[in-house]
Amino acid sequence: MAETVPLVSSQMPKKKKKQHEFIITAKKLLKNKLAVIGLIIIIIQIGMALFAPMITVHDPVKQNLASSELPVLSEGHWLGTDNYGRDVWSRIVHGSRISLIVGIVAVSLGLIGGVTLGLLGGYYKKLDGIIMRIVDLLFSFPGILLAMLIIAVLGTSLINVAIAISIWSIPSCARIVRGSVLSIKEKEYIMAMKSLGASDFRIMVKHILPNCFAPIIVFATMRMATAILSTASLSYLGLGAQPPTPEWGAMISQGQAFMWSSPHLTIIPGIAIMLTVFAFNVVGDGLRDAIDPNMDI
Amino acid sequence: MAAALTSKKINQGKILLELNGIKKYYPIRGGVLQRVQGNVKAVENVSLQLYEGESLGVVGESGCGKSTLGKAILGLEELTDGKITFKDTEIQSLKRREKLKFVKEMQMIFQDPFASLNPRQRIGHALEEVFTMHTNMSSSEKKKAVIDLLEEVGLKEEHFERYPHEFSGGQRQRIGIARAIALNPSFIICDEAVSALDVSVQAQVLKLLKTIQEKYQLSYLFISHDLGVVRYFCDRVLVMYLGHTVELGSVEDLFNQPLHPYTQALLSAIPRPTVQKNRKRIRLQGDLPNPADPPSGCPFHTRCPIAQDICKQDKPAWKEHESNHFAACHFAGQSII
């Protein structure tokens, strides 16, 4: 009886090692054709943003009035030029940098705020009421109006656009995280950590947070689409990127005046916005289906 | 080994843990203002002593408060009333800081081995975390301690980097045991620790629990609904009904001469391989009463086959009927078959 009880063979793990969750999710995602198209678009966009100076010849902000309003497929400017003679391809490529950076910054800030509020609200019953009422309050503003209000206070710039969009992302993120926390904190492994004397902070950060990553990732992907669209909308309204910054929304706004003579000035940035938003949305949908089709987002 | 497993003498050694009038009520809130409208009385006035090195079984049907009792002892549920004395210190009102000292001494093994481990944490890291929280070991010391622990419970070093989903139920329960004994406790609550396992695996895990009990001089509070397991594993048995303690005695006394009619009914429900045709079974009528609105008098009178008028009016006292054999019944000892 002194020695420990040996394991019998039936208890040994099955020979076929179970695959890591990440690989399983990735495989499921790659079976979804729409999501694969979305992924390709996103990868292309990231490539464009990373290698912008290498794949463009012209400076996106340099004016050249001698060759203004060239149509699509002109020599040297395959997407034409705008009314100041700036190369549209250059501006689209550099614009993808702005869209992605603003989107990532806005979503990250929104996640930091939303996850913190959601964790606290879900974990501490006493804070829950207060936090959720603040969230309800933020929800009651229409998104773009809230963003415009924040920009009106902070002033027009791309950083402020990112902040405005992030504040507007906080409430929905907080709700999603809170929902997951509420269900996870009742799990036995949380009880086990409490019985081992773990602090609330340790339980929240090391044990609850990693287990609500799935909905957070899906939310973040879908939010990227909304954030990029909102950046374009706000820039279109003149509240975001200021000329001559090559931003897609601002490009549409400037091209509007030449809608009849040079329609490509509005159509091309419009297509760029549409494809990006579409890509992030389908990837988000695909991720949700791959991780958990019953997820509540 | 056989002797070790069958010795069920009551070890009247030093008292390790003493419960005094433990109560746990869950308030029912309702109405517009969320006022307390009543209480679910999960644990009602439980008092008992646990000796060093003994295994005390707690049995009863689901909802009788046995798990709540275990969680209340560990401080996972706040007590409504009562005193818990552990190693001569009252622990129910200690602050978190002061309590950490006792956390090392009291541990819990959970029911569901598939739910009691964080699915996103490698086993080795989960066990290391226990040392991180309570000791100042360096990371190499921690790793060594964890590997020793794994070997102690019959696992191997190669399991260190694995995730919980790569283990079988029995192995996971071993990990749960490793986690519970990591800090060298003197008291472990096993909350239905083997009921989620196959019978063959149950036996192995029970043997492991016995082995570490002897090695570390552990006391167990063994919560279970499986009377067979309790009879095999425990020294004494406490029977609970609707949050009340109903009977407490050594395994021999309680299984051979049950005093309380509820215990008799429970024992008659144990399936036995027998050819005897007219084996009498006691079938209790009705359901467990609502713990928010418990019956007057004896909580069991609504289902008791020998209930009299007195049972409806007076709550029977918790009395020692034979030496070390307690029961709460006006007609203790009367057979109901």
Image (cartoon, coloured by chain):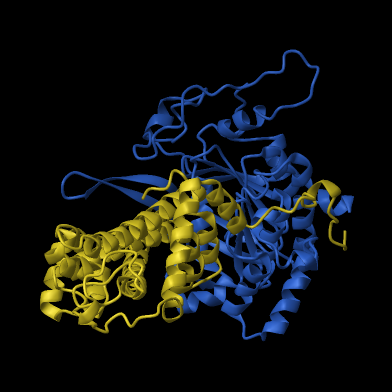
Chain colours: A yellow, B blue
Asked if residue B37 lies left or right of residue B305, the reply is: left
Among the 4 quarters of the image, the one containing residue A86: bottom left
Nearer-the-camera pick, B157 or A214: A214
Asked if residue B64 lies left or right of residue A268, the reply is: right
Give the residue displayed 52% in from the left and 73% down from the top: B89
Image x and y of residue B164, in percent: 65, 57
Query: Relative to B209, is A106 above or below?
Result: below
Query: Relative to B323, is A135 above or below?
Result: below
Asked if residue B292 lies left or right of residue A85, the reply is: right
Image x and y of residue B15, in percent: 63, 65
Give the residue displayed 50% in from the left and 51% down from the top: A291
Nearer-the-camera pick, A243 or B6: A243
Quadrant (top left, top right, bottom left, bottom right) of the N terminus of chain A: bottom right
Query: Relative to B167, is B104 above or below?
Result: below
Residue B295 visible (yes or no): yes
Among the 4 quarters of the image, the one containing residue A92: bottom left
Residue B46 visible (yes or no): no
